[in-house]
Amino acid sequence: MIDIVLFMFYLQKSESFNDYRFILTFADGQVIESDLRDLIGEYVNEHELTTAQVDMAWSCLTFLNGQVDIAPETLARYVGLSQAKYTT
């Protein structure tokens, strides 16, 4: 069950549209808009936000060619997705 839960949190797509606001699309189809400033602001300045990419091998949101990465489960927790939602 754990593997299925983690898969649900895999990041499929990310779009930056205003300052630190991103639209995140997870493997289960959920699309979440979130301000990531508190999560990444210390590591990525506003001018570096354009370097955002999804590393499809690890399903991480990366910046600066991988110098900064955020694991999908960290992103899911930050935006309020809950593991309990996927367990029966």
Image (cartoon, grey):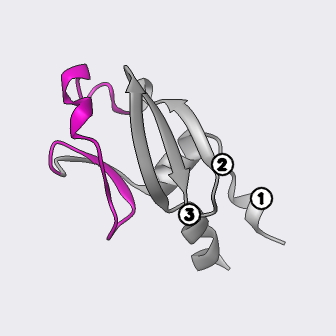
Q: Which residue is mark 3?
A: 27
Q: Which residue is mark 2?
A: 81
| Label 3 – label 1 distance at C-alpha | 14 Å
Q: Is residue 85 above or below residue 38?
A: below
Closest to the camera, between mark 3 and mark 2, is 3
Q: Earlier in the sequence, mark 3 or mark 1?
A: 3
Left/right placement of residue 86 relative to residue 22 reads right
Q: Which residue is mark 1?
A: 85
Residue 47: x and y in percent read: 19, 22
Q: Earlier in the sequence, mark 3 or mark 2?
A: 3
| Label 2 – label 1 distance at C-alpha | 8 Å
Which residue occupies 50% across, 44% down? 24
SS at mark 1? helix
SS at mark 2? loop
Under mark 1, the amino acid is: Lys
The span picked out in magenta is 40-65
Q: Is residue 43 visible?
A: no
| Label 3 – label 2 distance at C-alpha | 12 Å
**Residue 62 lies in the magenta-colored region:** yes
Query: Along the line of sight, which residue is nearer the eye, 42 or 23?
Result: 23
Q: Is residue 75 visible?
A: yes
Which residue occupies 21% across, 39% down? 51
Residue 57: x and y in percent read: 32, 71
Closest to the camera, between mark 3 and mark 1, is 3
SS at mark 3? loop
The N terminus lies in which quarter of the figure? bottom right
Which quadrant of the view contains residue 4? Answer: bottom right
Under mark 2, the amino acid is: Leu
Residue 31: x and y in percent read: 60, 46
Q: Are marks 2 and 1 in contact (CB under 8 Å)?
A: yes
